[in-house]
Image: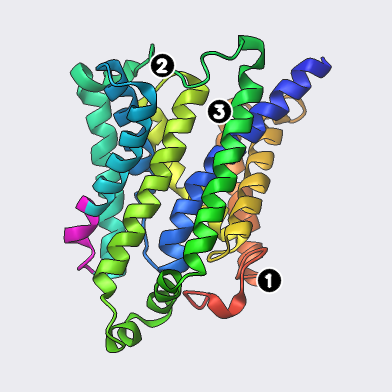
């Protein structure tokens, strides 16, 4: 029983680390640049599928991983180049539309993506680890990459480049007046945020050892939004804390059907209701999030 409990905690921490990385990419785009992206999950899936498909075509797994991250970033640029000229809310509509196009492509193009049956039988970087220790090795890998992502973003945000992103978030007209190429900086932010999402998607594929289009529903983007809002937009430590709180809540409520007169089908809806209520209360009393800076709010809530 204790072994089962430890195994479950390790699985929870793996998902926490993966979704923390995923949300850090969104926090770069929204929290630091002010870009409203509702299609972040598309790059989550593009990174994973690109890596697996390349590997199944004979590309060594480590090269495929790097390629998958780059491809996710490039798709972010391809979407942003035409759409970034739109006003913020219209850009958000384009991105959520793009994420659904990607998901339906995964569902229907069976010759490439395996369709609704997904993809399996691909190389895993940790395949040399004995099966009984695989989850532990996966946890170490995920947490190491989370720490690396955090440190890289911290260095970038504290650099002149990051200060320009913050100025764009506050008032892009001022940045333009100071001679900054706002469009180029936004594209760079989207590219890096999408690449980070691609990395998270690759890690999720390695964790499950299987790919399925249902992993990339629009709801997953809003998981990242909940994490960012909960922890505090524009604060990477807050994003990590938000991911830990969110996945702890999601995991603990899995046991609710055993104690409450509620079916497992209704449990998913109940979770979202509770999370929504908690976010409403948070926005009322602490709109900047748990670790956010109220002076840096993008919107007056």
Q: How far, Cα to Cα, is label 2 from label 3?
A: 34 Å
Q: Residue furthest left?
A: 82
Sequence-wise, which precedes: disc 2 or disc 3? 2
Q: Position of residue 244 (x, y in %)?
A: 66, 45
Question: Of the numbered discs in the image, which one, if any, rests on residue 265?
Answer: 3
Closer to the observer: label 2 or label 3?
Answer: 2
Which residues, given as a range, are shown in magenta?
A: 78-86
In the image, residue 213 lies at what x, y percent?
A: 35, 28
Q: State which quadrant residue 4 falls in.
A: top right
Mark 2 touches mark 3? (CB < 8 Å): no
Q: Which residue is mark 1?
A: 285
Q: Between marks 3 and 1, how big is the CA–CA gap? A: 32 Å
Marks 3 and 1: which is nearer the front? Answer: 1
Give SS at disc 2: loop
Q: Is residue 4 magenta?
A: no
Label 1 neighbourhood size at 10 Å, few (<14), some (14-19), many (20+)? Answer: few
Up-down relation of residue 170 to residue 138 (above or below) = below
Q: Quadrant of residue 85?
A: bottom left
Q: Is disc 1 placed on a helix, strand or loop? A: helix
Total residue callouts: 3
- Badge 2 crowding class, 10 Å Cα cut-off, few under 14, some 14 to 19, many 20 or more, is some
Mark number displayed over residue 123: 2
Instruction: State the quadrant of the N terminus.
Output: top right
**Residue 25 location in percent, x, y?**
45, 52
């Amino acid at each position: 029983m204790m072994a089962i409990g430890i195994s479950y905690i390790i699985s929870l921490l793996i998902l926490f680390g993966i979704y923390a990385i995923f949300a850090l990419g969104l926090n770069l785009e929204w929290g630091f640049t002010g870009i409203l992206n509702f299609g972040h999950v598309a790059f989550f899936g593009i990174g994973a599928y690109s890596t697996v498909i390349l590997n199944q075509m004979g590309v060594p797994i480590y090269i495929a991983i790097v390629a998958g991250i780059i491809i996710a970033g490039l798709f972010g640029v391809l979407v942003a180049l035409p759409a970034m000229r739109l006003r913020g809310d219209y850009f958000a509509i384009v991105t959520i539309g793009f994420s659904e196009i990607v998901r339906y492509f995964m569902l229907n193009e069976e010759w490439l993506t395996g369709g609704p049956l997904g993809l399996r039988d691909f190389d895993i970087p940790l395949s040399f680890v004995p099966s009984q220790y695989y989850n532990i090795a996966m946890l170490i890998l995920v947490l190491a990459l989370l720490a690396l992502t955090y440190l890289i973003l911290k260095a970038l945000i504290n650099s002149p480049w990051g200060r320009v992103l913050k100025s764009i978030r506050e008032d892009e007209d001022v940045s333009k007046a100071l001679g900054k190429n706002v469009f180029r900086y936004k594209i760079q932010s989207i590219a890096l945020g999408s690449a980070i999402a691609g990395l998270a998607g690759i890690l999720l594929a390695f964790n499950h050892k299987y790919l399925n289009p249902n992993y990339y529903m629009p709801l997953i983007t809003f998981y990242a939004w909940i994490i960012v809002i909960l922890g505090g937009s524009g604060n990477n430590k807050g994003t990590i804390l938000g991911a830990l709180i969110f996945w702890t809540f999601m995991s603990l409520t899995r046991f609710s059907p055993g104690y409450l007169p509620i079916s497992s089908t209704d449990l998913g809806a109940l979770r979202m209701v509770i999370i929504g209520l908690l976010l409403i209360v948070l926005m009322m009393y602490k709109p900047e999030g748990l670790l956010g800076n109220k002076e840096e709010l993008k919107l007056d809530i």
